[in-house]
Image: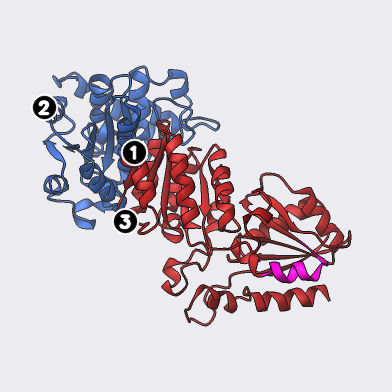
Amino acid sequence: MLRLYQTAHAGHIGSSLSCLEILVELCFRRLSTDDVLILSKGHAAGALYTTLSLSGRLPETTLETFYQDGTLLAAHPPCSGKLQAIPFGTGSLGHGLSLACGTALAQRYTGRKYHVYAVLSDGDCNEGSTWEAALFAAQHKLSQLTVIIDLNGLQGIGYTKDILNLEPIADKWRAFGFAVSVAEDGNDFASLIRAHDALQGKTGPGCLIARTVKGHGVSYMENRMEWHYLPMKDEQFNQAVQESQGASTDGTTGP
Amino acid sequence: MRAEFAQWIESFGRREPRFIFLTGDLGFGALENVQAALGSRFVNMGVSEQNMVSVAAGLARQGLLPLCYSIAPFAVFRPLEQIRLDAALHNLPVKIVGNGGGYGYGIMGASHHAIEDLAVLSCLPNLSCVAPLCNSDVAGACEAVFRHDGPAYLRLGLGIWPDGSDALPDFQPVRRLVAARDRRPKLTVAGIGPVLLNALPWIRANGKTDLFAVSQLPLPVPDPALAESVAGSGQLLVIEEHVARGGLGEHLAATLARQGVRFKLHHRHAGGYPTGRYGSQRFHQQQSGLDPDSLQATLAGLVS
């Protein structure tokens, strides 16, 4: 993924590193063939494209076109409907949960069975439409829906707690009628899997709150707002690769 | 038109199992038959139009045929981004139905009026706007909405065709309602929606004017009869209960200009709220020169 961003000279790296483990856990452990994944925080498209590609859902040749003129893979997931693994284009926050609700509700009429996952950001939880969708999901007891909040505590130009504080966020989702589980370290697979497994057997919609770190795994990016925007310089890329390779061989468990 | 709409929808819902009716918590005294006929396929979404449109997109992506119903401004402006991104750009068959197009909700005020809806929707990709002329035109308009593969907007209002439904030509994107007695008309009039009926009696009696109803935007194809009429008369009066920018007048002017037709455009359109005062639909039509008397004066001036 770092190489993808480096080749494209693109930003949004911090946002992608924040939810990378969430998407890996989904793509390699949760998603069956018929399940649906909607990345509401579309600016983390680099993480989505990479995990979809590595899990065999997106051709590598398509992945290589990221950011190029004429690509199907824009900086935000495309609205083209041309990629089976990306049912909806996103990029404007606050759409993903509603789209997931409609996708989940459709099962009542079509009889098909699948699970729907929507990955949301701090900023997504600022949008009124997200809470419209939360009311709807609970009202209609959408058990086949799991919302995953990539809660890294940063949004557009500051800390979430200083802009529109979401805490106590678990209480909020619980009060809206969701079964809630919290991964205290949402960048740790063991913590994520444990929290996700705890939602099994729930009734009604589920909410997995993953407390994550923006720019996780790259020391100079961690919890730094500017890595929502900046592309890496060559030496920064080399350092990022070195640090992330270190992270993957230091005993961290895979999914 | 609401009763005719509910009647058509009930029948369509009975024969089309993929049809899902979503309402933004509106339809009191109007949709009870639809609810009874559709059962669980009738969903009250609550007052949450943004969620309603995106949920509809989710349903449509799974092969269903959802319709989102509300008062026109609530159905269009609040969820405009959802219509643009989730329905139009994905080319999903999400049908938006707005009741009370134009000044239809009269004294309810500006919040309940939709006089910019065609402008903001008719420029969206894949989306077709359909505006029936009168109550008896609704069934044909609904068929056009569902015949269109992608997203569509149905703008309902209130209008009664004077001779009963038999004399009304079948629904078409463009229809000639009145033909001038001479081969070469003095004036061509085109309009959209029930406000056009305000001009109908005078035009029929006068006999020097061609009258066309346009009921679909953007126009699927340029209409040769309309172009020929405007080429002959050299002047086109457009009547619409919609602001000038992005409405039928500008659409037609551009279409005819592209066809090389030379003409002068006259335009009677919604003027907003020029005095800051509110009233019935007829009051607002008067303020914009769209009521029968004002239109008659305009027409007489152009034909003399």
Please count the marks in the image: 3
Q: Is residue B70 above or below residue A1?
A: below
Q: Which mark is residue B47?
A: 3
SS for callout 1: helix
Q: Is residue B95 above or below residue B297?
A: above
- Which residue is label 2 attached to? A194
Q: Nearer the viewer, mark 3 or mark 2?
A: 3
Labels 1 and 2 in the same subunit: yes
- Residue B46: image location, x then y, percent: 30, 53
From this viewpoint, is residue A46 visible?
Answer: yes
Magenta-highlighted residues: B199-210
Callout 2 environment at 10 Å: few (<14), some (14 to 19), or many (20+)?
few
Q: Which mark is residue B44?
A: none
Q: Colour of chain B?
A: red
Q: Which mark is residue A102?
A: 1
- At horizontal 47% and vertical 40% (from top left) the residue drawn is B12
Task: Say if the magenta span includes residue B209.
Answer: yes
Q: Amino acid at mark 1?
A: Gly
Q: Is residue A249 left or right of residue B258?
A: left
Q: Is residue A137 left or right of residue B122?
A: left
From this viewpoint, is residue B131 visible?
Answer: no
